[in-house]
């Protein structure tokens, strides 16, 4: 599955609708300190189902909503949409009829997050499983945050095992077992 487009609106410093086209191959994002490079990667993690506000550098999840500046009012919601080329049909069965997958997550103040896949409201868990199965996802070792290498080196054995399991591609199985146990 190839990520092809990321759209943000009201997300952190990206107050105005912003669209990023992700071409095949290597993409670099450059810019001065504080211009929003890390915010972009956080948007990617967030739309894939990130649940920890702390790992988004906030105290509550609503902190991802544009908080306002001297010249601009705060926003009431944030939305991120990720477009995926599913031409190779690698998505889980429930989503595999689609050539293109558009996953979006929206958070509104005091109303929490809602997810949509191609316009249809979807549970957070199903979005997380969609990505866990494809070796990506909010906690994928493919996404390395600033300072995370140091954390990995200092991690306790159990935390390090989780990272290895994700890398080995069995995290999706854990998600499913958890799901089965809840039923
Ligand atoms: P560096 O090169 O230092 O790593 P960066 O390009 O990664 O910088 P980010 O950390 O992505 O920069 O962006 C930080 C900016 O985003 C800060 O100016 C901060 O005020 C702004 N920001 C973060 N959250 C919000 C929010 N909720 N509302 C408005 N602005 C925000
Ligand atoms: Mg940064």
Image (cartoon, helix red, strand yellow):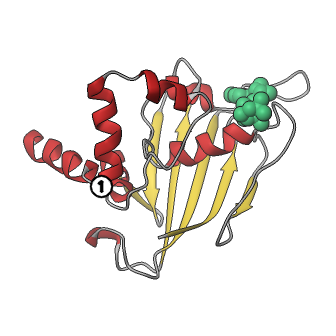
The reply to whether residue 74 is in sight is no
Residue drawn at (36%, 50%) of the image? 167
When asked about the image quadrant of residue 38, the answer is top right
Q: SS of the residue at dot 1?
A: loop
Q: Taking 7 as reference, is 84 above or below it?
A: below
- Crowding near the residue tagged with mark 1, few <14, some 14–19, many ≥20 C-alpha atoms within 10 Å: some
In the image, 79 versus 157, the foreground residue is 157
Farthest residue in the right direction?
71
Where is residue 44 shown, x and y percent of the image? Answer: 57, 48
Q: Taking 171 as reference, is 95 above or below it?
A: below
Left or right of residue 93: residue 2 = right
Residue drawn at (52%, 54%) of the image? 104
In the image, 144 versus 69, the foreground residue is 144
Where is residue 37 shown, x and y percent of the image? Answer: 74, 41
Q: Which residue is mark 1?
A: 169
Residue drawn at (53%, 45%) of the image? 143
When asked about the image quadrant of residue 147, the answer is top right
Residue drawn at (64%, 72%) of the image? 24
Farthest residue in the top direction?
59
Q: Taking 101 as reference, is 133 above or below it?
A: above
Position of the C terminus by quadrant: top left
Where is residue 98 shown, x and y percent of the image? Answer: 42, 78
Left or right of residue 141: residue 25 = right
């Amino acid at each position: 599955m190839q990520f092809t487009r990321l759209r943000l609106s009201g997300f952190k410093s990206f107050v105005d609708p912003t669209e990023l086209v992700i071409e095949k191959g290597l993409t670099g994002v450059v810019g001065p300190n504080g211009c929003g490079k890390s915010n972009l990667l956080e948007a990617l993690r967030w739309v894939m189902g990130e649940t920890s506000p702390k790992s988004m550098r906030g105290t509550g999840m609503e902190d991802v909503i544009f908080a306002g500046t001297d010249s601009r009012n705060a926003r009431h919601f944030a939305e991120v949409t990720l477009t995926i080329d599913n031409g190779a049909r690698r998505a889980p069965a429930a989503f595999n009829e689609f050539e293109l997958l558009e996953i979006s997550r929206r958070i509104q103040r005091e109303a929490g997050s809602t997810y949509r896949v191609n316009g249809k409201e979807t549970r957070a868990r199903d979005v997380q499983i969609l990505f866990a199965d494809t070796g990506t996802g909010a906690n994928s070792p493919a996404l390395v945050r600033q300072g995370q290498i140091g954390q990995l080196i200092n991690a306790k054995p159990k935390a390090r095992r989780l990272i290895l399991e994700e890398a080995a591609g069995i995290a999706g199985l854990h998600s499913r077992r958890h799901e089965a146990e809840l039923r």
